[in-house]
Image (tube, grey):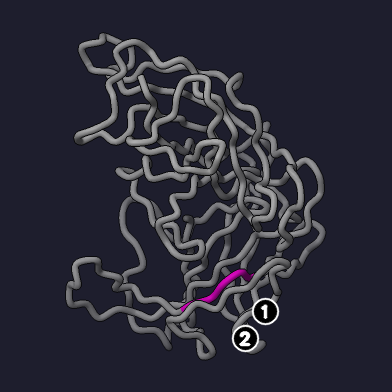
Amino acid sequence: LMSLLLAGSAQSQTPAIIGGGYRDPSILSVAPGQLLTLFVAGIGKHLSSKPLTASAPLPLILGGVTVTLRQSSAPTTVSVPIGAAVLTNTCQSLGNTPCTGTTLAAITVQIPFELAVDSPQDPSQRSEAILNVQEDGVSGTDFLVATVYSNIHFVTGRGPLALDYVSQASIHGAMVTHADGNPVLPGLPAKPGETLVVYGYGFGRPTNNLKTGDAPQAANPVPLYGSVLFSSLLPASAGTASGNLGSLDSLQYISYVGVTPSAVGVYQINFVVPPVPAGTPSCGGINDWNFMVTVGSSVGPQSFAFCVEP
């Protein structure tokens, strides 16, 4: 899932690497209703490595921690519901590599639906807001975020809470299920014409009003901005225009985009698997997927992949 570091006072912090690559790690985009985890340095006196979790409706204080959002438009200040809090560390080595890390508080929140966002018609006009974390009433430093109408992230279910770690190489790990709830796997592939469900965060404000922190009791659609691209994994010898992908750009296969009933901050897309192009290989070996869906959003496209029976 998306993550964020809210640093404490520079004078009280040990220097620590918080990211890398080719983008300023302090620039974060958030959408109304988005569930995400904030990584905060310098707090956590009431927290431990055992997660504190809350059920709906999410509280506004958890483990002595509160979060507020400020913006120039009304309402100018909004309290942010908290779903979980836990202490973590910058050294989370899967290979047990010796490493001295920095302790961080991982605070899972839901961005308020009252968030003012940029215009879908003119994404260049960026709106902004300020997040602030407090512990026992003591305020931390402000953190500026860009606000967008949609910031889709497909859930992989591979991390605790909203710590949804996923690399570009593992987009196939998204939670795609059959209508009965069973996961789509190479041994349980999807079939053309079948309705599947994929889950995610950050789809944006639903059509009908929903209180932040509450679990919706019924379906509630959300506008889907941008295109939907269906792609099959085809051999390069198939000679398709895009190299090894045969693609179909259409919204006609989408039957529902909206909130997931009984789940705070979770969204879903229900879609019908389109016809599979001739030559699409079966799943197996090094490829446990052969079909991909790419959905456009205000901060760039997001993809998920799964296995279809050719």
Q: Residues within 10 Å of mark 2 (few under 14, many from 20)?
A: some
- For image coordinates 61% across by 37% down, the residue present is 123
- For image coordinates 50% across by 65% down, the residue present is 161
**Magenta run includes residue 101:** no
In this view, the residue in front, 123 or 165, is 165
Q: Quadrant of residue 68?
A: bottom right
Mark 2 sits on what residue?
A: 64
**Label 1's element?**
loop
Disc 1 and disc 2 in contact, CB within 8 angstroms: yes
Q: Residues within 10 Å of mark 1 (few under 14, many from 20)?
A: some
Picture disc at residue 81: none
Question: Disc 1 and disc 2: Cα gap in Å?
Answer: 6 Å
Mark 1 sits on what residue?
A: 61
**Label 2's element?**
loop
Q: Please state the horizontal and vertical placement of residue 111, each as a whole percent of the image.
A: 65, 59
In this view, the residue in front, 221 or 7, is 221
- For image coordinates 46% across by 31% down, the residue present is 294
Main SS, magenta residues: strand
Q: Please state the horizontal and vertical placement of residue 62, each as a whole percent of the image.
A: 63, 80
Q: Please state the horizontal and vertical placement of residue 270, each as a whole percent of the image.
A: 59, 33
Horizontal side of residue 277 vs 198, given as left or right: left
- In the picture shown, does residue 298 fall above or below 273? below
Q: Please state the horizontal and vertical placement of residue 193, each as a whole percent of the image.
A: 52, 20
At label 2, which amino acid type do we have? Gly
Magenta-colored span: 82-86
At label 1, which amino acid type do we have? Ile
- For image coordinates 34% across by 62% down, the residue present is 19
Quarter of the rendering occupied by the C terminus: top left
